Image (spheres, rainbow, N blue to C red):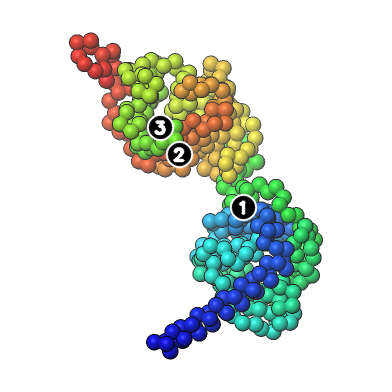
Amino acid sequence: MVALALAAVAVWAQEEEEVSELDRVLAMHHEARGGLEKLRSIQSVRATGTMSVQGMEAPFTIHLRRPNQSRVEGDFGGMALIQAFDGQQAWVQQPGQPKPTVVEGEPAAAQAADSALSSPWFEYTELGYQVELAGSEEIESGEAWKLLVTAPGGVTHQVFIGADDGLEKKRIYPADFGFGIEEATVRFEDYREVDGLMLAHRQIMGSAMGEMPLTLASFEINPEIDPDIFFMPGQMANAALGLYEIVSRYRNTRGASAAEVQTLRAAGTVVMLGFEVPMTVAFARPESFRVDIDMQGLPMIIAYDGETAWNVSPMTGAIDPTPLPQEAIGALGILSDFIWGRLADSEEAGVDVSLAGIEKVERDEAYRLDLVTEDGEARSLYLGGEDFLERRIVFNGSFLGSTGEIEVTIGDYTDAGGLMVPGKIRIAVEGLVVTELRIQEAEAGADIDPASFTMPAPADPETPGPAL
């Protein structure tokens, strides 16, 4: 028993010594880079420089943002090369490529690991990362400690820390330069202090294509960076298209079969007042609609039969069906225009349409059309730059008691019997989101009783409960 105990103590002491050695190397490395307090204060970095590729000098910019977002953009003779990771998805745009593409599989895992491990704030003790001290080796710059750093996705980097100064001297890692995963290297040279940090101003990348020196000319610590630049761009609009071509493509997208659909029933959820609750919606041409919401056992209804708007809202005391001013449901009324694609009939409806240019709707470019109805109501309608479907409409009005600029944003379309039905509908008043409808199922041409859109008669005094 004594012998076993002594053996156990010896093993424990050996493990402690190995762990302590790793901790000592990491502590020296963190201190050499500027100290943990400084590393933890970094939220973003922007760097610029030039890259030498096969005799060509290409300017590039690097953007990094906590926790693990990255974007590297180079200019190769007027053609952009972009490689980015938004924290979840990797994407790339090759020179001469009209649109970026999603990176998947091993290349995506390699890009995600490189995005995190190349960040100036990486501490090697991040959650989910495994670090092993694999002894020391003699490399180009002298003796170095060798660390094996494995990211949560299983990608391992060999990191070499200078034994004399504690700075990273070399890294061996998997990378994809457009020809599949290969082993790449990078050597770090010309360290200089920038705002309390030691940063390498020269990096020499090596791959099957040879060496590619990078010279860093400037670093900015904690600059303001637009988060959207890390995400893959969405639809792209064509500035050469005129109003006639845009409306024509919109009509083609909606399709002739959409005009034949007379009713639509859908089910999903609605987010209101911090709750996400079940919902069903029904539409019938030309303007009727009804929304039924189950507010945890309390039925809520908003409806319009083309003449009278009404609701049932126990939370506001409207237990019986109650008439509403038509303008109070303006956003849902506009939604009928989205569902039935009224822009296609704008000429017949006496709507004046003009092309106002190209603007962004979330991450998609969209064509902005300014509409003036026969009644003089002004609206701005946005069509997707590639699919030509309605993405947003902006107008002044009222919605459920709130008045001001109303913005209805829709997306995630699905085809329901020839009718393009949005899966997400978000309504905001004066920039504040009031509600969001999420549709999971839709049935075009559903059998819907027209009477369901009409406000029920008042309750019979002789019969308990409302007529509804």
> For the residue marked with disc 2, what is the amino acid?
Lys
Question: x and y percent of residue 317 in the render?
Answer: 37, 19
Quarter occupied by the N terminus: bottom left
Residue 183 visible here: no
Residue at 62% from the left image edge and 31% from the top image edge: 355
Between disc 3 and disc 2, the foreground one is 2
Q: Residue 155 carries which label?
A: none
> Mark 3, residues whose alpha carbon is within 10 Å: few (<14), some, or many (≥20)?
some
Callout 2 secondary element: strand
Q: What element carries label 1?
A: helix
Q: Dots 3 and 1: beta carbons under 8 Å?
A: no
Badge 3 or badge 1: first in the primary sequence: 1
Q: How far apart are marks 2 and 1 (CA)?
A: 23 Å
Of marks 3 and 1, the one in the foreground: 1
* Quadrant in which residue 421 is drawn: top left
Q: Which disc is residue 259 wearing?
A: 3
Question: Camera-side residue: 417 or 401?
Answer: 401
Name the residue located 45 percent from the left edge and 39 percent from the top edge: 424
Which residue is outermost to the top?
461
Say which quadrant the C terminus sits in: top left
Q: Where is residue 142 in the image (x, y as percent from the top left)?
A: 74, 82
Q: Name the residue under label 2.
A: 424
**CA distance for labels 3 and 2:** 22 Å
